[in-house]
Amino acid sequence: MSDDIYSHLTQLGGETKLPNSPDTAVLERVPNPHPGTQYCVRFVAPEFTSLCPMTGQPDFAHLVIDYVPGDWLVESKSLKLLLGSYRNHGDFHEACTVGIGKRLADTLNPIWLRIGGYWYPRGGIPIDVFWQTSTAPDGVWIPDQGVPPYRGRG
């Protein structure tokens, strides 16, 4: 790893334990190799888990994160560790989804960011949560998130 632009990274390149909570997770960033060029970056987490804050039972979601970077990209291992830190964290679907989006936006200061949280049914009702920083910029190809509405077995 280069000792210049990546020297500040604390998690990449070695064994890193899963943080105990989202509050202790360290979200890191790296310089955008194409500053001034607008393009879309997508992360998909099809097996995201958290806990119901009332029952402690696991909740499951398919997260899709899209962003148009400004000067920074998220370092993907730190994102994976942040998402993994929710495994033992109790919060409602809305708090998890929007909290992740805001944390990324605060760290990266992207041109645009959106997150879709497609949650599997709790009490027989699936809950989908969507948040974005602003209107998507013109001229950037932003594909549909590609997650169909929950249909169960029907």
Image (spheres, helix red, strand yellow):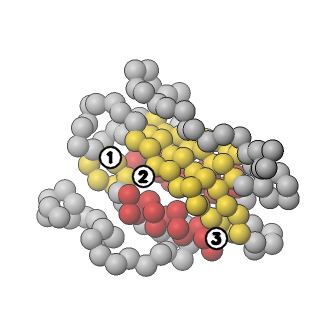
In this figure, which residue is indicated by the disc labeled 2? 107
Q: Looking at the image, how many numbered discs can be counted on the residues? A: 3
Mark 1 and mark 2: span between their CA atoms? 9 Å
Amino acid, disc 3:
His
Q: Residue at x 53, y 68 (%)?
A: 84
Q: Position of residue 59 (x, y in %)?
A: 70, 64
Q: Residues within 10 Å of mark 2 (few under 14, many from 20)?
A: some
Q: Position of residue 142 (x, y in %)?
A: 47, 30
Q: Are the two marked residues, 1 and 2, in contact with CB atoms closer than 8 angstroms?
A: yes
Q: Is residue 11 left or right of residue 25?
A: left
Q: Position of residue 90 (x, y in %)?
A: 69, 69
Q: Residue at x 75, y 74 (%)?
A: 56
Mark 1 and mark 3: span between their CA atoms? 27 Å
Q: Residue at x 34, y 78 (%)?
A: 15
Depth order, front residue of 11/103: 11
Q: Which mark is residue 89?
A: 3
Mark 1 or mark 2, earlier in chain? 1
Give SS at disc 3.
Answer: loop
Mark 1 or mark 3, earlier in chain? 1
Mark 2 and mark 3: span between their CA atoms? 21 Å
Q: Are the two marked residues, 2 and 3, in contact with CB atoms closer than 8 angstroms?
A: no
Q: Residue at x 58, y 61 (%)?
A: 47
Instruction: Give the quarter of the figure containing the C terminus.
Output: top right
Amino acid, disc 2:
Thr
In this figure, which residue is indicated by the disc labeled 1? 72
